[in-house]
Image: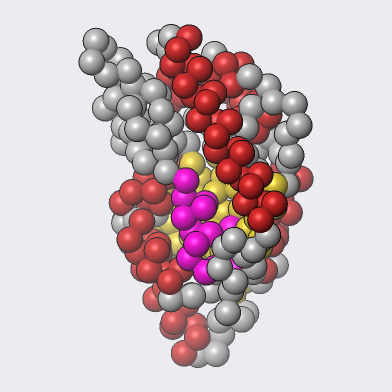
Amino acid sequence: MITRNIRKKPIIVLATGCLEVTTTQYPYTHFNCPVIHGAFENAPAIASGVYRALKAQGLERDIDIIVLAGDGATFDIGFQSLSGMFERGEEVCYICLDNEAYMNTGIQRSGATPLYALTTTTPSDTVMRGKMEERKQVALIFGMHNIRYVATATLGYHVDFISKVKKALQMKPSFLHVLTPCPTGWGFDSEDTIKISKLAVETCFFPLFEIEDGYLKLTQKITKKTPVRDFLKLQKRFSHLSDEEIDKIQELVDRNYNYLLEFEKAGKVFYQFS
């Protein structure tokens, strides 16, 4: 869905991750365009270099520079270079494919892993109950970086997803945060991928919104929430939870969604691109 909506000549920069290892078996790639793979931490720095090289030749308006990275490269290891790229205002579209852990290297926790989720580095025992920290709200963080467009998306709402890809390519610098459920890491049957994607939105566990020129707008407003329990019970990574822990997650989900409603109501609460 991403590459299908590219209208200019693209150059794609890949961070190390699940997408990269499955699409770039040397010397081949699955892409019909130039692709650069660096490391976990430096995809935004590479994209910055590509942008500046094109700008020096007067070609930056003719080519779409797109970074595709996972949550580990975005939330943690590459956060510094990504923040710097946005702070400099370089016209790059950055797309984070978020499966909420380091799935490529063995299902270790990341800054995107939700509260209480089981990973190989956050087990459940008498002391730990899975990951004990909340996940980072990176879309809001990058919304405060004075970039033109920020949005969240997921596979279950493909029309919304395609619309946001088009906007992200047209309004650079841009950041698109895409929830990508992982059957292996989350513990569910692959045939339930779309169902889980939709439940993430319907429970408000992963709200869909966009920030355009400083204004936040919920693109899928949920008037009657599905209980978050319905989303959690389909995944083995949450199979150990007590009723009290599920209630805690519900409380956090409600709080975070109410924050978004307040941001939307307040008008321009994020920086305006200048």
Q: Position of residue 167 (x, y in %)?
A: 69, 62
Of 244 and 157, nearer the camera is 244
Left or right of residue 154, residue 29 in this image: left
Name which residue lies at 74% across and 39% down.
Answer: 221
Q: Residue extending furthest bottom?
A: 57
Q: Position of residue 28 (x, y in %)?
A: 45, 53
- Against 212, is 265 above or below? above
Name which residue lies at 60% across and 38% down.
Answer: 257
Name which residue lies at 44% across and 82% down.
Answer: 52
Q: Which residues are magenta?
A: 137-150
Left or right of residue 52, residue 163 in this image: right
* Rendering quarter of residue 154: top right
* Rendering quarter of residue 174: bottom right
Name which residue lies at 56% across and 85% down.
Answer: 59
Magenta stretch encompasses residue 125 = no
Q: Position of residue 114 (x, y in %)?
A: 43, 31
